[in-house]
Amino acid sequence: MNNIIIINGPNLNLLGSREESQYGTVTYEELKDKCADKAKEIGVNLEFFQSNIEGEIVNIIQQSIKKHDGIIINAAAFTHTSVAIRDALSIFKKPIIEMHISNIYKREDFRQKSLISDISTGGIFGLGTNGYILAIISIQKLINNEN
Ligand code: DQA
């Protein structure tokens, strides 16, 4: 069975109560459960991780090099600032999906630059929290070379 990880960056633990117009009403716990259900349905081992701390995200990416076959990452605000997260992802030579709940290209200028898009296999943005479900389905196909 493929092992995948969803890595969430700062403030995503507050989903459901945070800027509902951008991020919707699904809570972090509900999202985690929905992702777990989809992973079970399609037969993939899923780890779900969140941290507000940049270094912890770098550490989990480094650990994923040995443990996981694919990474789905919503680096949140670190998307726009973190060379360290970009560098760690660059070492991971397997499929990476960049995930954003909102359409970052329709928002403030500073959100329209992602430091991880060009080293990701692909990306999903602007589709709300449903994007996570699409990302799980897609990464399974990428890992299995079914694309
Ligand atoms: C986000 C977009 C980022 O710009 C923002 O800092 C987030 C969430 C998204 O999922 O739409 O925290 O990554």
Image: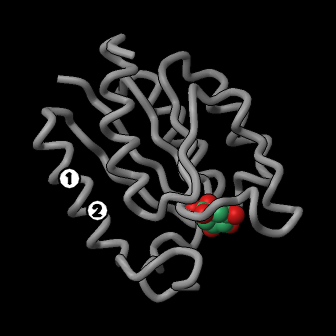
Q: What element carries label 1?
A: helix
Image quadrant occupied by the C terminus: top left
Depth check, front residue: 119 or 56:
119
Label 2 neighbourhood size at 10 Å, few (<14), some (14-19), many (20+)?
A: some
Dot 1: within a 10 Å radius of its alpha carbon, few (fewer than 14), some, or many (20 or more) residues?
A: some
Q: Position of residue 22 (x, y in %)?
A: 58, 76
- Give the alpha-carbon distance from disc 2 to disc 1, as whole Å: 6 Å
User: For the point 37% across and 72% down, which residue is it?
Assistant: 28
Residue type, mark 2 in image: Lys
Whether residue 53 is visible, yes or no, is no
Identified at 13% across, 33% down, the residue is 43
Q: Using the image as rendered, state which of residue 55 and residue 111 is in the foreground.
A: 111
Residue 122 image point, x, y percent:
57, 31
- Quarter residue 83 falls in: top right
Check if mark 2's residue and mark 1's residue have beta carbons within 8 Å.
Answer: yes
Q: Residue at x 68, y 42 (%)?
A: 85
From the Cβ of disc 2, is ligand 1 less than 8 Å away? no
Relative horizontal placement of residue 87, taking residue 121 as reference (left or right): right
Measuring 35% from the left and 76% from the top, which residue is drawn there? 26
| Type of amino acid at the residue the image marks with label 1 | Ala
Q: Position of residue 47 (x, y in %)?
A: 30, 45
Secondary structure under tag 2 reads helix
Q: Mark 1 points at which residue?
A: 36
Q: Which mark is residue 32?
A: 2
Farthest bottom residue in view: 17
Judge whether residue 76 can be spotted in this image. yes
Q: Tell me the quarter of the image containing the N terminus.
A: top left
Residue projecting furthest to the top: 145
Q: In which quarter of the image is ligand 1?
A: bottom right
